[in-house]
Structures are given as structure tokens and as C-alpha cells.
Amino acid sequence: MPELPEVETVRRSLLDSVVGQRISGLRLGDFPGVLADQRAEDVLARIAGREIAGIHRRAKYLIVDLDDGTAIVVHLRMTGRLTLVDRSEPPLRFERRLPLPAPVDSVEALGFGVNRLVDDLAGWLLARGLGVVRMSLTLVHERYLRERGMPPTTATFALGAPARTPAHLHAVLRERLARVALPAPVEAIVLSSDETAPLASRNLGLLPEDAADAVVVPLVERLRSRLGDHAVATLAMRAEHRPEQAASEVPVLSRSASFAHSGTGSRATRARANKTPASPRADAAQHPPAPAAAPRPLWLLDMARPLGGVVEAKPWVLRDGPERIESGWWDGRDCRRDYFVAETADGEMAWIYRDHRYGTDDGEWFMHGLFA
């Protein structure tokens, strides 16, 4: 905790730098809760464009006087300092360098140093109410190699959702480092946060078993760390009636960034939740129940398999259908099919269709998928 002389020193050092300047913006960095229950937008609306007329001190509080007679009261907390940075500097980010006692030429030997940096990152995130979305680990090689032009080895990590639990970050980094091949010995490690997002704290329990919850690293993140970001994909639905074109592969990496902005709609959601609910009859009139979805198989074949004489040799039982799908006339890949859910002679449930693209009623039978 700073004493009175230290607070006075900070006050005097700010006089020549900020007095006479106008406030143009507000950015929360070190402590998201510094404004208590005030919103940053509301505070900025009151102080934007105001000129700083002076700075005086009362006990351990710094009082920044504005030209409209109001003031901003600042307490230095435990740090005992205010940081003056250039306005063009990017948002605050974590970056920590750890020199190694001796050059290391194996990835396994880096584990202890990486764990230390991860613990520092977790504490930095917890103090700011943040979770890391993207981070990078830079392995700095020996000096004589850097002088010869060898660049550092950098490994990047993108998480599926903001996280700050040390065990979670350790597991992700360990999987990712297993794929790194060191071209030369390493003499220092640098861990930095490239992208962060707000992350609420977890409520702690009073019982001993509440603190014993094991940290579960999502399987997708483990696969991405071990195989690479672009080796793992997910399915994204498309507005398309033809089953073989109704979904497409999307890299998981392109979807994880959305978590960083997931709070943008929270205020609108709360506003809708606070509205007085309508009566059940009025709500049913405005939102009629959706029709039951047609059955879709869990396993869709890459290409429909002609059944040929299979059905004739051992007849299948049609359990549901037909469902007519007719589409694609505009792109030259038109289809006209009647889909059925059929039970095979072995008791499996298959998704089959009859092809009517040539306008006949006795088209060939194809199997397009299997139900679990």
C-alpha cells in the first residue's frame, strides 16, 4: 500500500503530462471492476470531452478536477502507481519472458518453465475477470544463432472458449508442444495472450468435495492441440434441401473467435426477459408450434448406394414416408426423390429413396444413410 509521500510523488509527476488535456476515451484494462456498478459507456458519456483542470490530493486519494466542476477520484490500491502510456498503444496484454538457467534442446525439458508461465497467466486473467482465447508460446534460441538470423520458434494456440484454469491451459499446451520440433537449443520462453474475453468466476462451495472437481479439457481442444488447428472440423448446416449438400465442413478455428464477442447480445436478451409475458393463447397465436421434423439418419453416406436386386432378394419393410425432395433445377444438379425409412432384412433402419429425376414412377432404389 503506498504511503502519503508516494501518492504525492505520483500527483506531481502527472501535472505536466495530463493537465490541460481533454478526455477522449475510456478503456478498462487492469481491473474490470474499478467502476463498481457503473457502466463504462455511462461514465464515458459524463467525462468525454472534458478538460483536466488540475490534480490535487486528499489523504491517499488523487482527485482529478475537470473543467465542469466535477472530479475523478483515484485510489492507487496495492500497486502504488499509475501507468502513463501512449494513446496509440494496443490494449493491455499478458507477456512474460522466462530465461532458462541453461540451454534446453528437448521439448520435454521445457515443461517446468512453461508451467510457471501458465500459472502467471492464470493469475493475470483471474485478476481481470478474463479468459484467454488465443495465446502464443515463443521459444527463443541461443544468442549466436539469433545473430546468424535464426528466428524464434513460435507455437500458437486457439481455444474453443475462454479459459483460465491452470490445469486446462497446462493440458492444451502439453498436447501442442508435443508436435513442436526444436531446430536448436532454447534459452528463454515467452508466453503471451493474443486475445482475451470476459469470463465470469465460478462460485465456490463450502463442502470439501466442491473444490475437488476435476478439470475436463474439451476433446475438441485436445485434438486441435495434438493434430493442428486445421485438422479438426465441425459440420455447419446450410439452407439446402438436398441432403448431400445440406451441411459443410467448417474448421473449428473459424468458430472459436465468436466466444470473444458472445456478450454483445446479453443486454437485449435481458430486455426481452424483463418484458411481461403474454397469455398462453396469445403466445400460441403469434408462435404456432413448428411441424414435426422429418427423420434424418445419423450416418449419411458419401454417395448413395444403389440397392439393385438387394431389395428384390430380401424385401425391406417401409416404416415411414414418402418424403418428396425436389430441388436443384437452377444449378444443373436437380433431383426428384421420394425418401422412406426402411427396415432391412437384418433389422437395421435405413434411409432410402426412389429416384424420379427422369419423370418415371418406377425409378431405381438407393440407400442414402443409416439410423443409429
Image (cartoon, helix red, strand yellow):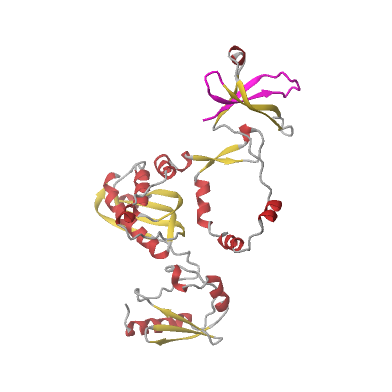
Position of residue 213 in the picture relative to residue 304 (left or right): left
Query: In the picture shown, does residue 240 fall above or below 69?
Result: above
Q: Position of residue 266 (x, y in %)?
A: 55, 60
Please count the marks in the image. 0
Position of residue 12 in the picture relative to residue 242 (left or right): left
Q: Position of residue 315 (x, y in %)?
A: 60, 16
In the rendered image, the residue lying farthest to the right is 359
In the rendered image, which quarter is residue 283 located in?
Answer: bottom right
Q: Residue at x 49, y 46 (%)?
A: 253
Q: Position of residue 269 (x, y in %)?
A: 58, 60
- In depth, the one of 15 and 333 nearer the eye is 333
For the N terminus, the image quarter is bottom left
In the rendered image, the residue lying farthest to the left is 101
**Residue 354 counted in the magenta span:** yes
Q: Does residue 187 appear in this view?
A: yes
Q: Residue at x 47, y 40 (%)?
A: 232
Q: Position of residue 87 (x, y in %)?
A: 50, 70
Position of residue 223 in the picture relative to residue 324 (left or right): left
- In depth, the one of 336 and 211 nearer the eye is 211
- In depth, the one of 263 and 52 nearer the eye is 263
Q: Does residue 142 appear in this view?
A: no
Query: In the picture shown, does residue 371 fall above or below 288?
Result: above
Query: In the picture shown, does residue 42 fall above or below 195?
Result: below
**Residue 175 counted in the magenta span:** no
What's drawn in magenta, residue-wise? 344-372
In the rendered image, the residue lying farthest to the top is 313
In the rendered image, which quarter is residue 220 located in?
Answer: top left
Position of residue 118 in the picture relative to residue 14 (left or right): left
